[in-house]
Image: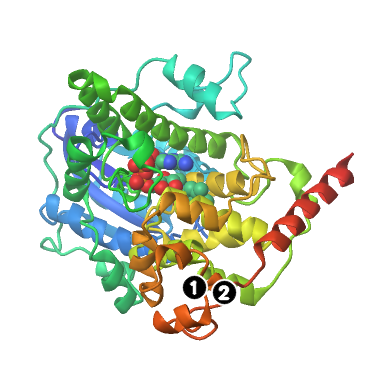
Amino acid sequence: MKKNTISIHWFRQDLRLSDNPALNASAKNGTVIPIYILDTKNTTERPVGGAGRVWLHHSLKSLNDSLNGSLRCFKGDPLEILERLIAEEKPQSLTWNRLYDASSIARDSNIKTRLSKTGLTVLSFGGSLLWEPWETLKADGTPYKVFTPFYRRGCLHASPPRSPEPPTSIKFVQNDSNGETHIDGLNLLTNKYWEKLVINDWRVGEIGAKERLNEFVKNEIADYKEGRNFPVKANVSRLSPYLHWGEVSPNTVWYAAKQKIQFNPHLEKDIGHFLSELGWREFSNSLLYHFPGLPKTNLQSKFDSFPWTTDESLLRAWQTGQTGYPIVDAGMRQLWQTGYMHNRLRMIVGSFLVKNLLLHWHHGESWFWDCLFDADLANNSAGWQWIAGCGADAAPYFRIFNPITQGKRFDPDGVFVRRFIPELENLPNSFLFTPWEASTKLLDKCKVKLGETYPKPIVDLKVSRERALEAFSSLKSAIT
Ligand SMILES: Cc1cc2nc3c(=O)[nH]c(=O)nc-3n(C[C@H](O)[C@H](O)[C@H](O)COP(=O)(O)OP(=O)(O)OC[C@H]3O[C@@H](n4cnc5c(N)ncnc54)[C@H](O)[C@@H]3O)c2cc1C
């Protein structure tokens, strides 16, 4: 490309200025027109969920501020929009960072082919993953289906991830409409009350991502290995929405953590464990890329005949945190009230849905998709397939999380449960996870009326566990 030319950078899930390979490539060759397109044509299968739209709205505002108002936003069919913009602005090139789901790949390949034919240079880059999914294959060229060899051999034995690119000065073309963009015109916000309630906990955008990363690496990563299991401990990064929306690159996170080991070798186990969780993110994306049906199709086809039940009232009780099992309800209410759920809780509530309630994992996947700020096609689908036992390297089906023992073990002082279930706050710890076992006298004293102020358990744990195991063994006998 020639110097002093115009280039368009199409922001997608890379809503940041630093360590953005495609944006930097655009900038190397002249001034950049930064654009965002809300694709309403190619994502009918999986439009951004409710919480995701709220995050996106605030993230675009923040990005636009960093760009001094030069972000141009569009809504509709990306190919048509790009063709129009190219005809008006006559850029020499178009850049973007890659996405890895089937529908984005098909759309992007089509756009690349169509626009390249007009003489435009169209360049795509890897900006969302540490390793490209085609770089982490087994020796025989097939994708890994088990995490440990994927991470150890596929990732750690490959070339190290790219180092973050140093900041460069980028010249952006000012937006014709005097810095006014159409972010509001994308109509991403719909439920004003809920949105205000949940977004207040977060500083959305690139600056917020940097602050979160710095705080985590400085003060919270020590004891990650053990502390990450306890929902009230501040040992998890809460970087997932920032990583999903690309407000920070995984490379920046990876090397920030690595650098900490250099000066604190005693933290190697904790930091190594944290890096391996980034490895799970790579694994999920590799699965999505190589098995594009992941969001809908059981990776283990024997689960296709699994005898799921349907029960709207049980599903509603689970969604609204009214199952009568305090640790499950606290997790579901955390999701609703904060747009986030701690990983330990995701496993507990997931297991409860698919095993104790015997409801299809699709229900859980789609509720999470709508409620999580970090809702991510790869991580969410892989997470649900893992918990349901039908995924790659999944938790064995017979591993059924017991919500009573999980609660007692990972929230021993009941701080998490009391935070999200204030109606149980006066119950002593000994009955906090099993309120139905408390005497009427104690319940009265603690102002708990089971079935009125807090629900009775919607299923019996023992009976539902046996029913789940029976359903699983019927599946085994069906295939043998
Ligand atoms: C049923 C289920 C659904 C899930 N849905 C999502 C989802 O939609 N989006 C999402 O980002 N994660 C999802 N996860 C994975 C995990 O729960 C979250 O990434 C994690 O809780 C985010 O919190 P954190 O940033 O504090 O994590 P940390 O423990 O600080 O981990 C750092 C980063 O590593 C990645 N990571 C951590 N654990 C996993 C994992 N098990 N799989 C893939 N990546 C991981 C995330 O990007 C995370 O931000 C799901 C897990 C389950 C069991």
Q: How is the image coloured?
A: rainbow
Ligand 1 is found in the corner quadrant, namely: top left
> Is 308 above or below relative to 476?
below
Dot 1 amino acid type:
Thr
Q: Which residue is found at the position 31% from the left and 71% from the top? A: 195
Q: Which residue is found at the position 33% from the left and 29% from the top? A: 270
Answer yes or no: is residue 68 visible: yes
What is the count of numbered marks? 2
Q: Residues within 10 Å of mark 1 (few under 14, many from 20)?
A: some
Answer yes or no: is residue 120 visible: no
Disc 1 residue lies near ligand 1 with CB under 8 A: no
Which percent across, then down, holds residue 79?
42, 51
* Residue 253 horizontal side relative to residue 377, left or right: left
The quarter in which the N terminus is drawn is: top left
Residue beneath label 2, please? 316
Q: Which residue is found at the position 11% from the left and 40% from the top? A: 171
Which percent across, then down, holds residue 326?
48, 66
Residue closest to the eye, 60 or 284: 284
Quadrant position of residue 464: bottom right
* Residue 127 horizontal side relative to residue 107, left or right: left
Residue beneath label 1, please? 320
Disc 2 residue lies near ligand 1 with CB under 8 A: no
- Quick one: SS at disc 1? loop
Which percent across, then down, holds residue 97?
35, 38
The quarter in which the C terminus is drawn is: top right
Quadrant position of residue 217: top left
Which percent across, then down, holds residue 152?
48, 19
- Distance (Cα) linking label 1 and label 2: 6 Å
Q: Which residue is found at the position 62% from the left and 56% from the top? A: 361
- Quick one: SS at disc 2? helix
> Is 219 above or below relative to 257?
below
Decide: marks 1, 2 in contact (CB < 8 A)? yes
